[in-house]
Image (cartoon, helix red, strand yellow):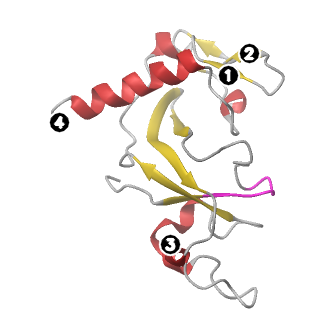
């Protein structure tokens, strides 16, 4: 908590999020659900999706760590099947920034075909089932701006 992750991990296996649609400059929101409340864990701007010197030496056997240069962040998927680094410029990790319930009901995503969808299972500002939130989805510009506002207001507030 309080640290800025320099990297996250993408992969083709279902154990990792597929960042295949992300490009350098995109903003990604890591979200966490606790007791039906959705929290913004970190806002990450994608820097690149390449293995760099900071990642450490690539493994030569299956027993070697995949990304020894990012040992502090292994829990973000470094050990996942087919993991690939996604270098990010991120806000500090936190678990105390809830997405307001009224905003939760208004969040929308757009798929590659241009269809939009809202978050399912929102009841009285709480998320009853997190299944429609699991994965990697592209927010509509309006929803991205609304989440950015939540993060920016929290960053500007004295603690």
Can you give x and y, in whole percent of width and height, for residue 142 in the image?
54, 15
Q: Which residue is mark 1?
A: 109
Can you give x and y, in whole percent of width and height, for residue 104 in the image?
53, 17
Residue ranking furthest to the left: 158
Q: CA distance from mark 1 to mark 4?
A: 31 Å
- Range shown magenta: 9-15
Which residue: 44% across, 51% down? 89
Q: Which residue is mark 4?
A: 159
Identify the mark at residue 70; answer none if there is no mark. 3
SS state under label 1 = strand
In contact (CB < 8 Å): disc 2 and disc 1: yes
Which residue: 69% across, 48% down? 19
Q: Mainly helix, strand or loop, the magenta region?
A: loop
Q: Foreground residue, 34 or 15? A: 15
Left or right of residue 64, residue 47 in this image: left
Position of the C terminus by quadrant: top left
Q: CA distance from mark 1 to mark 3?
A: 31 Å
């Amino acid at each position: 908590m309080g640290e800025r992750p320099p990297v996250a991990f993408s992969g083709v296996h279902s154990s990792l999020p597929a960042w295949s649609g992300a490009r350098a400059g995109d903003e990604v929101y890591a979200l966490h659900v606790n007791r039906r409340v959705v929290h913004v864990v970190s806002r990450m701007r994608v820097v690149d999706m390449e293995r760099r010197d900071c990642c450490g030496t690539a493994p030569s056997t299956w027993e070697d760590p995949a990304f020894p240069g990012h040992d502090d962040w292994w829990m973000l998927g470094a050990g996942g099947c087919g993991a690939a680094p996604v270098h990010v410029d991120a806000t500090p990790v936190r678990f105390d920034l809830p997405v307001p319930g009224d905003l939760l009901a208004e969040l929308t995503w757009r798929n590659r075909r241009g269809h939009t969808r809202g978050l399912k299972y929102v009841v009285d500002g709480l998320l009853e089932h997190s299944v429609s939130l699991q994965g990697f989805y592209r927010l509509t510009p309006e929803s991205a701006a609304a989440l950015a506002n939540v993060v920016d207001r929290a960053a500007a507030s004295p603690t």
